[in-house]
Image (cartoon, rainbow, N blue to C red):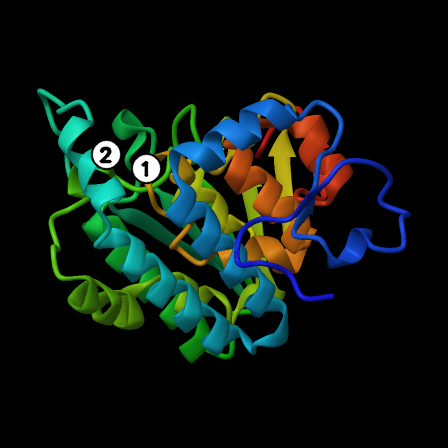
Amino acid sequence: MRLPSVPVIGIGSRDHALAARLDTLIEPRFDAGAIVRSIAAQPLAARIVTQLLRLVPHLPDEDALAAESLAYAALQGSDAHRLWISRRPRAEVVPREGGVQLSRDDDVLTVTLDRAEAGNAIDRTMRDALHEAFALANADSTIAKVVLRAVGKAFSLGAELSEFGTTTDPAMAHAIRSMTLPAREAVHCRNRMEVLIDGACVGAGLELAAFAARIVATRRSWFQLPELAMGILPGAGGCVSLSRRIGRQRTLLMVLSGRRLSAGEALDWGLVDALVDDPS
């Protein structure tokens, strides 16, 4: 069955003979009408993320990350994304630059997102520090476990929005991601990686966390991929990490809907492995 280059969405049972061939299926608590409106508002981004997610399952991790970055770069240069940049609210006060805390206890390396006043939004400084932290874990064979966590009330609100549009050349942006994207190192230590999530886990924060072999979240946590409304797609590794963890159909459903998943829904989907009251 040849599919057109637009999202092909099913309504009905996952047990249908053709269900696995479709791009996504409408699941309970998702609004089909809202998804159609989201696609109509951002048709190019919806088309490109759909095509990308058809490719990712057939590619090795490194190639899949490269394909995601190239697709993201194409959308970075789109009129739709530039329009979103021109309309986004401007923060009167920009929080301090982000960073990570590193600590080691015997053979366990703990990496802590440290930008609580900005909801641990990942800016360039934090991105580079995360890349270095995971590179360290990959270089040191005595590190048996990597724990990723965060300070504050949110695990991460995603990428720092004020930095969107600062690199205007999509080719250069792709080159930067090829060298500094934390996912490129995280993917090589994911079998040793555990993530502890409390509160909001959005965009780039979720994309990075989803690489981990084990994810533990508090019951008040929630999860979201809001990128489609910005005219782009998850570009911090999420098209790879989430599709490996929950499948391409549910990944696309999260992208096209932009809907928040509760902790309970995330557990049902396998997006998280356990729920706790206390993330410590």
Quadrant (top left/top right/bottom left/bottom right) for the C terminus:
top right
Q: Quadrant of residue 158?
A: top left
* Left or right relative to 151: residue 259: right
The residue shown at (39%, 27%) is 152
Q: Quadrant of residue 13?
A: top right
Provide residue 34's location: percent of width, then percent of height.
55, 24
Query: Could you say which is closer to the camera, residue 232 or residue 19?
Result: 19
Q: Estimate the spatial distance between the alpha carbons at disc 1 and disc 2, rounded to whole Å.
A: 6 Å
Q: Are marks 1 and 2 in contact (CB under 8 Å)?
A: yes
Provide residue 171's location: percent of width, then percent of height.
19, 69
Query: Could you say which is closer to the camera, residue 251 or residue 104?
Result: 251
Per the image, the residue denoted by label 2 is 84
Q: Residues within 10 Å of mark 1 (few under 14, many from 20)?
A: some
> Mark 2 or mark 1, which is nearer the start of the sequence?
2
Judge whether residue 98 can be spotted in this image: no
The residue shown at (37%, 62%) is 71
* Left or right relative to 170: residue 19: right
- The total number of labels drawn is 2
Q: Is residue 73 shown above or below 30? A: below
Provide residue 73's location: percent of width, then percent of height.
28, 60
Element class at badge 1:
helix
Per the image, the residue denoted by label 1 is 230
Judge whether residue 111 can be spotted in this image: yes
Q: Amino acid at mark 2?
A: Trp
Provide residue 252's location: percent of width, then percent of height.
58, 46
The residue shown at (71%, 53%) is 22
Query: Could you say which is closer to the camera, residue 274 or residue 208?
Result: 208
The residue shown at (47%, 31%) is 38
Q: Residues within 10 Å of mark 2 (few under 14, many from 20)?
A: some
* Left or right relative to 32: residue 235: left
Q: Amino acid at mark 1?
A: Met
